Amino acid sequence: MKKYISDIADSIPPSGIRKFFEIVHSTPGCISLGVGEPDFVTPWKISDQGIYAIKDGYTHYTSNRGLPKLCRLISENIQSSSGISYNPEKEIIVTVGVSQALDLALRALINPGDEVIIIEPCYVSYASNISLVYGTTVRVPVFKDEGFQINIERLKKAVTSKTKAVILNYPSNPTGINISPEILKEISEIAVSNDLVILSDEIYSSISYEEVHHSIISIPGMKERTVYLNGFSKSHAMTGWRLGYTAGPENIISAMLKIHQYTALCAPSIAQYAAIEALENGDRDVDKMKAEYTGRRNFIAARFNEIGLPCPVPSGAFYVFPDITPTGLTSEEFALKLLEKQTVAVVPGNVFGECGEGHVRCSYATSIENIKEAMIRIENFTKSL
Ligand SMILES: Cc1ncc(COP(=O)(O)O)c(C=O)c1O
């Protein structure tokens, strides 16, 4: 019911994924390949630091920007992965997940009517986040025949005099692909020649497999026009702690900090203490989780191909995005019928954008036993069609 609700809140659709998961929760015995979060619990030594923070009474607001030590560690971490240095006192904010960092960036940058380019299929929140700041979403599709890589000519054509920013997300949710340094370079040239800001959501950067992850901030001239977004949710299995961070040019970060001061005050203090441990001593845990994901990825991609649903082996994140067109079903029919007949949940590709049609997203952030059983059920399902 629209009564009392603002036009903008009324206009944004409920998340396609959420709608689907309400059905999943009411399906007994369901194996879910739908969730977008690590199945691992947060490594104990990280959780312990959160517990100590509570015991020691570090339960107050922190500075708006975040604990100085955490900001310094974040800066060092970005420097070691990309070679780019950010001033922890001026160019970094600790946020309530990447979600809040993205919201702050859009609020700080977008005037009503400004256009923001997203590369679809993509993370479900981007278009609604843009709508919430009265921006206009411009969708640039990527296709399986092009390996889901950005077609530079298509991107160039999407830029108009109203374009303000481009949101990138590599490794990608939902395709799991990474981006080559050559394509990043071409995107940078478009950004520079059209004076665009890049919002680079690199939340899966530490879950990159054989290929090294390249950040756009490493390209000369891009630090000055990029808002870098990252966090602890996926890398350290800390989704519920709600902790992320952003780094960028001082003027943009200052504008974001003003909004953060009024809307969140600071990120959760307990999570910030835990995150210090994550950055100081968590690398081995990240590597262990990645090794486990690698085995699962190889297995699930091979099984999809065996079943006759073409599935590239992704180079990052924890999703596969198989092509389900051989079944003759739409992605929504496939997901609903699979759930009904074999109680396995996958996410229809069309929720990530129209060009995700013909695919489903399967998360392998679940045990190998679950994945093996799910693949038997998916095989039975496809044979029964
Ligand atoms: C691409 C992408 N960005 C951002 C988020 C949200 O991350 P956070 O938990 O840090 O808010 C997700 C969560 O699934 C995601 O897949």
Image: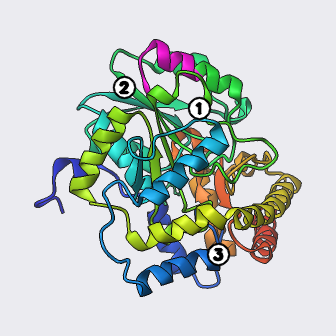
Q: Quadrant of the N terminus?
A: bottom left
Does dot 1 land on a helix, a strand or a loop? helix
Residue type at numbered disc 1: Ile
Q: Which residue is mark 2?
A: 164
User: Which residue of the protein is positioned furthest toward the top in this rendering?
Assistant: 193
| Magenta-highlighted residues | 187-197
145 left or right of 41 in image: right
Q: Which residue is mark 1?
A: 216
Is 259 part of what is drawn in magenta? Answer: no
Could you tell me if the residues under marks 1 and 3 are in contact, i.e. CB atoms within 8 Å? no
136 left or right of 328 in image: left
- Establish if 80 lies above or below 300: above
- Label 2 CB sits under 8 Å from any ligand 1 atom: no
User: Residue 333 location, x and y as percent?
Assistant: 59, 57
Residue type at numbered disc 3: Pro
Q: Earlier in the sequence, mark 1 or mark 3?
A: 3
Q: Is residue 34 visible?
A: no
Residue type at numbered disc 2: Lys
Does dot 2 land on a helix, a strand or a loop? strand
Please tell me the numbered disc located at residue 43.
3
Q: Residues within 10 Å of mark 2 (few under 14, many from 20)?
A: many
